[in-house]
């Protein structure tokens, strides 16, 4: 008994040592695995995904991805695996920043960007890639994209999943054939005012021209107006004119009474120049002046702008036929 | 416009009986112009080919004239069309010389060949104006024309440099901190930038992100982007971080501007509540001062009572 007791006493420290050694090995192995993992499992940061048209089955849609690398490495390819099913189209590269030039291909739900000449990319580099020519899935719902940067092996350098994008069956997304488009409508292309100084109602008249503007330009549009250099002029003897209410919008005034020729602007959607607040009137200029702007796309609803053209005459106004041409110019802003 | 035409006084009188309103003698007219949104690749010294599309949504044919125009690019994407042809592209872009007739509810694709001069790598803009030929017999004619532009990208390395400023107050008495980020192109080439605006608040605020899509910034121009952040509680510190990314010398490299501001936001209700609390404390203190002390003898307060005793 004593011997056995003595043996046990000797064995205990050995067992402890063995356990300690095993524990150390296990800890080391775990550490090794943990230190090895980031090379294949580090998560990309600042990830985003946006689509140019979120209508289901929409063709010629652009997918834009941006993210930041977490691990330094030589990126040979980047895969963009879109969740769900039904992704179609032949992708093209619209923009690629932060990564070398490359080619793109799609297989099923995965778009692969392959860098022509792989180069080392440090950690924390922002990358932006925009693909065109894609066709959305025909199924409405929420979708994400898993982005993976790969080495030439290929081995995963970083990966991550973007926030979700919703594809909808019916919405007000602008559908465009060419990516930047502007439609400009005027409700009347010519008008007349039959005036008479002997009757107040006929001596001071207005004609309203309605304009609508619709654009998908991300920075909106600018609307300017101009008239002939001669203004509202008669072809009669001496070419008399009806004076403008002001030299331009900078000197807009409350309607001063006859004789005068001017305009004021109101509208919805667009930002109307403050020169016309309080129903102030301005005279047209031949060089043109901006009267309304918008800083974003109009979406599905057109902006409406009303221009009230007002003429007032009295017995100082020479009789005759007066004419002028008002030109409205709508220009999409640069994105 | 017919004004004080003596020969038509009788006609004017009859018009007056009918109300004397303006008479439209020309109907409505719509017009649309589309251009490629992305820059057209153009090799210096080569020929770039692209097209513009003129759409006639009307129920009648429209005749248009397309002419070259100068462009002025302003801050925040503003574009204004000049009154004359752009000398840079004179003889290099051939717009249709004769008016184009576009059938009702139809469109015309107008192909353009642009002879690109030997330019340094950058983005270049070709402005033009699409003007419908005026119709209608009224003496006051209205023309709705569309100005637009094509963007050419002459490839190659270029010197891009952006600078940014985040304008936010350090203290706000209100419900949210709002300001603007202003990015200016100080380089020698146009820049496409993108980024994000991240907002967090302490204590306990949720992370909010505003994506900034790609936008163009020509040389010397600025863009202002509104930024805002809300604390979760009536009092909080809002941290606004904006990141603007843009290509470096080549598209294969990117640069980033990171701007951070911390703003203390205090709701006016907090001040009102604090004021109310102070008033309450003051009122309680004042009342306590006026109230007789329990330790004082009754005689000290009421001399008459002392005499009676």
Image (cartoon, grey):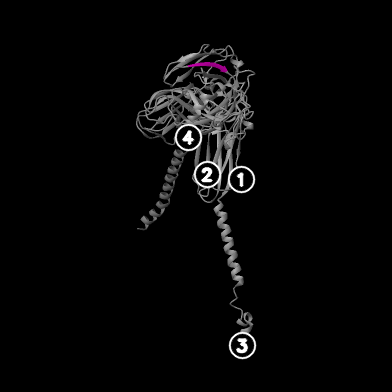
Q: Chain of mark 3?
A: B
Q: Give me the disc on residue B219.
A: none
Q: Are marks 1 and 4 in contact (CB under 8 Å)?
A: no
Q: Are marks 3 and 2 in contact (CB under 8 Å)?
A: no
Marks 3/2: CA distance?
A: 74 Å
Marks 2 and 1, the one that precedes in the sequence = 1
Tell me which corner region of the image, top left, top right, bottom left or bottom right, holds residue A200.
Answer: top right
Q: Chain of mark 1?
A: B
Marks 1/4: CA distance?
A: 29 Å
Vertical side of B173 occupied by A168: above or below: above
Nearest to the observer: residue A89 or residue B24: B24
Q: Which residue is mark 3?
A: B308
Marks 3 and 1, the one that precedes in the sequence = 1
Q: Which residue is mark 2?
A: B200
The stretch in magenta equals B63-68
Q: Are marks 2 and 4 in contact (CB under 8 Å)?
A: no
Q: Which residue is mark 1?
A: B170
């Amino acid at each position: 008994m004593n011997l056995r007791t003595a043996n046990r006493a000797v064995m205990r420290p050995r067992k402890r040592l063995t356990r300690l050694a095993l524990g150390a090995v296990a800890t080391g192995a775990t550490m090794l695995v943990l230190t090895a993992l980031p090379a294949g499992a580090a998560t990309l940061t600042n990830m985003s995904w946006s689509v140019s048209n979120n209508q289901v089955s929409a063709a010629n849609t652009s997918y834009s991805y941006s993210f930041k690398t977490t691990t330094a490495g030589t990126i040979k390819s980047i895969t963009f695996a879109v969740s769900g099913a039904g992704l179609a189209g032949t992708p093209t590269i619209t923009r690629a920043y932060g990564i070398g030039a490359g080619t793109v291909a799609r297989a099923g739900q995965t778009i692969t960007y392959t860098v022509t000449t792989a180069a080392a990319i440090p950690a924390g580099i922002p990358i932006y890639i925009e693909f065109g020519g894609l066709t959305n899935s025909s199924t409405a719902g929420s979708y994400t994209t898993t982005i993976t940067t790969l080495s030439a092996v290929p081995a995963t350098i970083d990966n991550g999943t973007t926030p979700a994008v919703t594809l909808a069956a019916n919405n007000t997304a602008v559908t465009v054939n060419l990516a930047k488009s502007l439609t400009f409508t005027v409700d009347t292309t010519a008008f007349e005012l039959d005036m008479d100084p002997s009757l107040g109602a006929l001596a001071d008249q207005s004609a309203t021209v309605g304009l609508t503007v619709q654009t998908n330009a991300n920075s909106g549009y600018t609307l300017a107006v101009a008239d002939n250099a001669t203004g509202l002029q008669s072809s009669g003897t001496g070419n008399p004119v009806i004076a403008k209410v002001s030299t331009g919008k900078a000197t807009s005034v409350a309607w001063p009474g006859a004789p005068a020729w001017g305009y004021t602007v109101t509208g919805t959607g667009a930002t109307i120049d403050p020169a016309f607040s309080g129903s102030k009137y301005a005279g047209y200029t031949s060089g043109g002046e901006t009267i309304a702007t918008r800083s974003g796309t109009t979406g599905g609803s057109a902006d409406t702008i009303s221009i009230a053209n007002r003429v007032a005459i009295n017995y100082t106004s020479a009789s005759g036929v007066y004419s002028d041409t008002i030109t409205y110019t709508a220009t999409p802003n640069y994105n | 416009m017919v004004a004080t035409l003596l020969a038509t006084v009788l006609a004017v009188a009859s018009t007056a009986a009918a109300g004397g309103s303006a008479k439209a003698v020309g109907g409505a007219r719509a017009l649309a112009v589309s251009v490629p949104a992305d820059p057209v690749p153009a090799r210096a010294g080569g020929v770039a080919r692209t097209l513009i599309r003129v759409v006639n949504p009307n129920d009648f044919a429209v005749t248009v004239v397309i002419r070259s125009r100068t462009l002025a690019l302003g801050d925040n994407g503003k574009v204004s069309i000049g009154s004359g042809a752009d000398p840079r592209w004179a003889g290099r872009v051939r717009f249709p010389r004769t008016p184009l007739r576009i059938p009702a509810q139809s469109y015309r694709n107008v192909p353009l060949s642009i002879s690109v001069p030997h330019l340094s790598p950058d983005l270049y803009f070709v402005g033009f104006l699409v003007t419908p030929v005026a119709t209608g017999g009224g003496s006051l004619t209205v023309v709705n024309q569309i100005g637009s532009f094509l963007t050419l990208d002459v490839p190659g390395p270029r010197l891009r440099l952006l600078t940014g400023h985040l304008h936010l107050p350090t203290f706000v008495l209100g419900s949210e901190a709002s300001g603007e980020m202003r990015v200016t192109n100080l380089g020698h080439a146009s820049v496409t930038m993108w980024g994000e605006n991240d907002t967090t608040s302490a204590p306990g605020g949720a992370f909010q992100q505003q994506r900034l899509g790609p936008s163009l910034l020509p040389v010397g121009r600025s863009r202002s982007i509104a930024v805002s952040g809300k604390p979760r509680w009536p009092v909080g510190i809002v941290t606004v971080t904006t990141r603007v990314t843009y290509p470096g010398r080549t598209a294969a490299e990117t640069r980033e501007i990171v701007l951070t501001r911390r703003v203390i936001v205090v709701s006016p209700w907090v001040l009102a509540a604090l004021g109310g609390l102070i008033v309450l404390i003051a009122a309680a203190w004042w009342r306590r001062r006026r109230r007789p002390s329990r330790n004082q003898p009754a005689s000290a307060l009421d001399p008459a009572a002392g005499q009676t005793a």
